[in-house]
Image: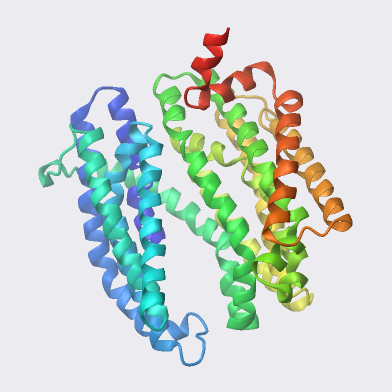
Amino acid sequence: MTVVTTTLNSAVGRYITIAFELDNDDEANEYFNTSLFGSVLLVLSLTPLAILATLHLDSIIELPAGQETQTRWLFACTVVGFFLTTIRSPFGVSCFCRNRFDLQNAVILIQQVARVGIVVLFFSLITPQVWQVGVAAVVAVFCGWGWSIRLWRRLTPTLSVSPAHFSRHALRHLTSTGGWISINYIGVILYLSIDLLVVNRMFGPAVGGRYAAVMQWSALLRTVVGLIAGLFGPTVLYYYAKHDIEGMSRYARRAVKMVGLFMAAPIALICGFSAPLLSTWLGPAFIDLSWLMSLMTAHLSVNLAVMPLFTIQTATNCVRTPAIVTVIMGLGNLGLAIFLAGHMGWGLYGVAAAGAIALTAKNLIFTPLYTAYILHRRLDAFLWELLPVILATLSLSGVAKLLAAVWDVSGWPRLVLAAGGLSILFAFITYWKLLDHEERASLWHMIPGASSKRCGKA
């Protein structure tokens, strides 16, 4: 269902931002209302499919014995929450257009706190059951709705809900760009989500549960970088609207390096401290999956660093080729996962290895080369930015592994102490050795109030 709704809503931020940059409020309203009412129509058309999937959920995934009804209720609530979020998404574009990701993330935080808080309340007052998680998710979405509407009115007062502004012209633009983005999303699913289904079907829900638990840290890192990468979107669109390709290229190179170095520390520490982290977090029974966790996480040093380049593909509307490549390699990932896990007998490591190989092959080769091509830069323009990221991640991971071998860092206090000490040392070396003067100045500029203090001292 996300693939279908992505067709309409994935590109609305691009077109509204460009319309605002050109002071064209009427066009911005056309794209907003086309996205909004189109989303409502999509939700209505997808409802029968959702009901059918809920009733026959056992034919899609293997359900734990005795939990069939509970899981169906969870799935139904998740679908309702998804539909509500889909209809709300056009209102969230206001934060994107005005570059107010602080407010956007505040809404996300409120929604997540509400979801977790309601689950804890349910589990504390009555017998914990799976359906309670679904209900909490739906209530949390309603909390996010209220704040999204408030921010929409505050940040973009020129936008209004009006069926008269529904435009076939805007619909063609949105679906033209969004259609290829949705196809790209199919490939993303084949890369990032299909492994859970493969493990569930090949090894059963119990093993799938262990795999999913270990996967949470890499999923968390992807979520964090997804939010960070979104910060670069409005600036990239600004450069594009002004036809400043050189400025866009320079900005993108710096973004790749900064994101990669920023994430190098958590990636390396999770890999280096995987065994004590699993022992502390999930218990000694999960220590045998420490190398699986490292395999899931290590390749993210490259695959997360290139995420700012995806905004360039959307801004320039060069999304067809990446979509085709992503789907083809995503299918390759699925086939490789089944082959390594089953035929080669690698088990869970085969599924994780397939994802690491396929995703890294795409983002280390295709993504930087294609982005350089569409910007008419040298083909190695973005490749060199990845080199310090890879070296930094490998070095810190090795130091963490060595420290874990000579000192027992199990337990949260020692883990925090070890990770904190290495992070401070890594930050110091990165700041003075891996960043140039312009990058250090840019870093201070991103810290609220820091740049003015430095200017005052100067």
Q: In percent of the image, x 34 and y 75: which residue is there? A: 76
Q: Residue 237: where, in percent of width, then height? A: 42, 29
Instruction: Specify whether residue 330 is in view.
Output: no
Q: In this view, does 129 lie above or below 99?
A: below
Quarter of the figure with residue 282: bottom right
Q: In percent of the image, x 65 and y 32: which residue is there? A: 257
Q: Residue furthest right?
A: 406
Quarter of the figure with residue 68: bottom left
| Quadrant occupied by the C terminus | top right
In screen coordinates, is 404 left or right of 318? right
Of 432 and 165, the residue lying toward us = 432
Of 239 and 205, the residue lying toward us = 205
Of 87 and 335, the residue lying toward us = 87
Quarter of the figure with residue 251: top right
Q: Is residue 94 above or below residue 272?
A: above
Q: Residue 81: where, in percent of width, then height? A: 32, 64
Q: In percent of the image, x 48 and y 22: which residue is there? A: 449
